Image (spheres, helix red, strand yellow):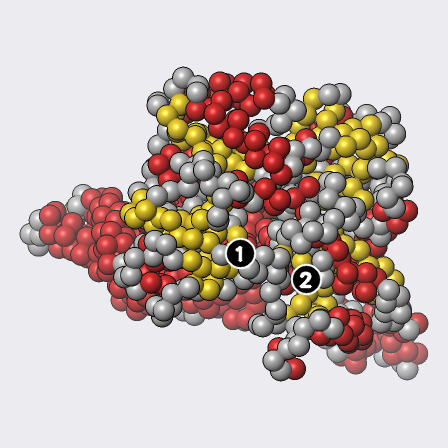
Amino acid sequence: MSRWLAQIRLAARSLFRRPQVDRELDEEFQYHLERQIEDNLHRGLAAEEARYTAMCEMGAIAKSKEECRDARRVNWIQDLVQDLRFGLRMLRKSPGFTAVAILTLALGIGANTAIFSLINAVLLGNLPVKDPQQLVLFQWESDKWPPHFSMTGWESGFSFSYEEFKEFSAQKNVLSSVFAFVPLGFNDQNTSVGINGEPTLADGVMVTGQYFSGLGVTPLLGRGIADADENASAPRVVVISYAYWTRRFSQDRSIIGKGVTLNGIPFTIVGVTPRNFYGISIGTEPDLWVPFDDKPNMRPWSASPGGTDSVFTERDWLCLNIMGRLKDGITKEQAQGVLDAIFHQFVTSDWRPPSESDIPHVILAAGRQGLPVLQNNAAQPIYMLMVAVALLLLIACANVATLLLARANSRKKEISVRLALGASRSRLIRQLLTESVIMSTLGGALGLAFANWGTRVLIALMSKANEGTTSLDAGTDSRVLFFALAAAVLTGILFGLVPALHASKAELLSAMKDAAAGVSDSHNKHRLGESLTVAQVAASVVLMISAGLFVRTLANFERHNFGFDQRNLLTFGLDPTRAGYHEGRLVNLYSQLLDRIQALPGVRAATLIQNAPFSGWSNKNSSVSVESSAQKQGDSQLYWQTVGPDFFSAMGVPIVLGRGIQRTDTAASPRVAVIDETFSKNYFSGENPIGHRFSLSAKYEPANSYEIVGVVRPAELTDVNLGVHPKGYASYAQFPKTLGQMFFEVRAEGPPATIVSEVRDAVHQADASLPLIALKTQAEETSEALSFQRLFAHLTTVFSLFALLLAMIGLYGTMAYSVTRKTREIGIRMALGAKPANVLGMLLRQGIALTLMGVALGIFAALGATRLISSMIFGVSPYDALTFIIVAAVLLFVALAACYLPARRAMKVGPIVALRYE
């Protein structure tokens, strides 16, 4: 160790105190020389002969000094510093070239860094909690689970019953803490908050007592939720987020102990979370957290249809997400083995599986990122964007490499002289690569600034596409800085290596005369430049075709007929259960509100639907039993909605057979249903379904079946991407026990904006405590549902246009260099009688030939690349001929313009100009 420290001290002294060390080295050699001279004088030699003999005995002193300097092992650092200084000086000599190269690289590196910042925040980031690597997320996995129901709003594989949670919580030998959580409603603004008597909406989560302690989160103010807060006799408390504290209470530090009402129930604020804590799902941020309550108080719709107080007490109603923290020294596999055995026993206690392989198993997934909701939805699009910007960076590299090749030709004499003076080829390549890395590093620094701005824009667009619910911290951390630095260095090597290799082959003789000996080397460089231009065009074609398919997808969605009339339609939601409405009283309220709204001037019709169109929510049942001898065909999944009277006429959905849902379809009348034509074709094979009955598998209502009273045209009311599936509709009034939030669909005579205030007043006249949820026109709802497709189409279009711009700049540079290289040839042609139009045609043919080769290569590559995005496009084939033709035509047109300018300059070259060039 002491030896290493001594070497480090010596190297540092040699590096930072070089003049002093060299002076000491000179003094040491001088000392030895003088001692040798003295010895020679003592032996009787004359003074001059003694010096000469001493110098001969010591050998080449200058060489010995160099060997001593080499022994310090810092020469490479000194050479690097020298290369950096020389590289900066050379770049300063060509400010135009340097500026263009740096801006080009900044665009490519900045775009890549911006997308990587998203990857870092969404896919690589951890929850802002203590030791997130010790967290585990409970999942189950099985293809043949018995009938169950998931109410968490998340993936059903992450949902468990409350009884299962209690079993897991008892396993203190492998987990130091276990906690559960569940949203307070299906939509984001799921809680009515009363502050000073004013009702507002907030996003709430119900959590068990170890939620904050298990995550290791210490509140900024007050305390978190504890186990004691779950007791029925405990005071009702709420913890609010930092953002909500700032937005609603202006960071009032005296807020602790103040009261608010949540869904009409009084609560006391006991804590404010830290600024960086956003819950257990990256990209979302709840406003408040309340203690777990197994009674249907905060979640009124969680009352069990089976007759018990709450679905939380039902064994196979999967209502909770569960996370835990591993005990020190316990691995995830060890804990999973213990918990899976308990889960196995729990599941099989009241269900006999067909075989052992059908039993679901518990899987402990890594919980460092919490619930992977945003990750699952955004992973594929973000990776696709990363591929797009990587292509953009490759185009930028090819562009700058083309510039370097042209610049190397002007430096041919300089490089040849340096080689002739003894510089090695490797030393010259290192010097040229250093210049390239300097440019790419400067481009990376500027690109990092672009990335910071671009990341904020991307997050804002993602939040808008997700109705303002995306909350991401995609700041520049050490991982992003390392990526930007690595991208800059690798980019510099990538675009600088080939030009450096070609430049280092220069010969002194060919450089000293502009004769035929130099033509071959120049010709080779030009061929390489043309190859890079072809590659740029090909990459641009791939990006443009992909962007074209996404634009076509967006256009197809916007023109698509979803099966109902979206014009003049106003939609909003109400959840009166938050104000204490239940069962018959709730049915009466909805009926009264429909009457009030239909009586308003300018309103043509009004109805109800359980889940707003394109909200992504729908009841889905995969077990349908039809009382018919017809053989079932096709899709067995049924998407189920409860709706209000006159729903189909109000929504503009044509009724093909029978009737729609009517006011007479109440809880006191037999249950009826309306199906769509897809359901009818799948289950009745052309037979008239009116009067037939079917039932859905449901634990709590096994004996109930529905009489089919109508058939309607298919309408896509759940999701823009859902496609055609069998759908059924029932009357909301026939389900009073499970009735909760509903959405009103109001058809106006004219623009919906003209009736907004009247509709709001009508609701508040019935009950002023009812806040309207997501009041907007159906056109706005559809536009928001297409926000992701719009965002992706816009981003890929922007990237493809940048790629096209860079490729055309590269083509322009190649043609301009070609004109410069052929100035003598063009002058001779003109002297021999060639017309300017002939010269123009010759150069245009050269540029178009390069473009055609790039387009052909790009189309071939796109045929393979577009298959990867087939799941993300709609209404258009991945090999859509029209898109391919339009992209090729656009590229050829723009390439013609890029080639015309240098070709037009070539038309002015005459014999005198050519001789002057010589």
Q: Secondary structure at mark 1?
A: loop
For the residue marked with disc 2, what is the amino acid? Asp
- For label 2, the residue is 316
Q: Foreground: 39 or 139?
A: 139
Q: Secondary structure at mark 2?
A: loop
Residue 410, percent across and down?
39, 55
Q: Please indicate whether residue 457 sits to the left or right of residue 281 in the image.
A: left
Q: Foreground: 559 or 891?
A: 559
For the residue marked with disc 1, what is the amino acid? Asn
Residue 345, percent across and down?
76, 74
Residue 669, percent across and down?
49, 44
Q: Residue at left 68%, top 65%?
A: 139
Q: Is residue 865 visible?
A: no
Q: Residue at left 40%, top 36%?
A: 646
Q: Please indicate whether residue 805 sits to the left or right of residue 160 in the image.
A: left
Q: Foreground: 52 or 103?
A: 103
Query: Of tags 1 and 2, which is closer to the observer?
Result: 1
Label 2 CA crowd tier, 10 Å (few <14, some 14–19, many 20+)? many
- For label 1, the residue is 704
As drawn, 784 above or below 113: above
Q: Residue at left 59%, top 42%?
A: 736
